[in-house]
Amino acid sequence: MDRRRHPRFRTRFDVLCSAGEVEGAGVLKDVSRAGACLAAASHVPALGTKVRLYVFIQPVCPFELAGEVVRVGEDEFAIRYGNLDPEIGRLVDDVAALVTTRD
């Protein structure tokens, strides 16, 4: 039973990440209305770091997710969005329509 408030959707989209002056890249592993996880990250920011993710979904223009790092691993990290903006909900709905596997 999944106790999460917002379902996660598995993805594999290229992402650029900006954490202050440090930039990196990775793959968006999953996304929900509350947060996202970046895997294969070239840079893993420390807990509490404010980050911006630029997700590339073809043929749509990249979209931006901003939040705070809440979990880190060897080559991945997860963020929680700072603001549950309705725009994020629409973007997550678009991603969910592109992928079929829910976690």
Image (cartoon, grey):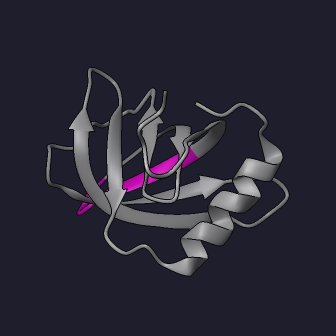
User: Residue shown at 44%/38% (left/top)?
Assistant: 38
- Dividing the picture into quadrants, the one containing residue 21 is bottom left
Residue 16 within the segment the image draws in magenta:
yes
Residue closest to the eye, 71 or 34: 34
Question: In the visual, does 42 lie left or right of 85?
Answer: left
Question: In the visual, does 60 lie left or right of 54?
Answer: right
Image spot of residue 20 (x, y percent): 23, 63
Residue 73 within the segment the image draws in magenta:
no
User: Residue shown at 54%/39% (left/top)?
Assistant: 30
User: Residue shown at 34%/24% (left/top)?
Assistant: 75
Instruction: Name the magenta segment's main secondary structure.
Output: strand
Image spot of residue 94 (x, y percent): 75, 60
- Dividing the picture into quadrants, the one containing residue 62 is bottom right
Image spot of residue 28 (x, y percent): 54, 40
Tell me the magenta residue range. Answer: 15-22
Image spot of residue 37 (x, y percent): 43, 40
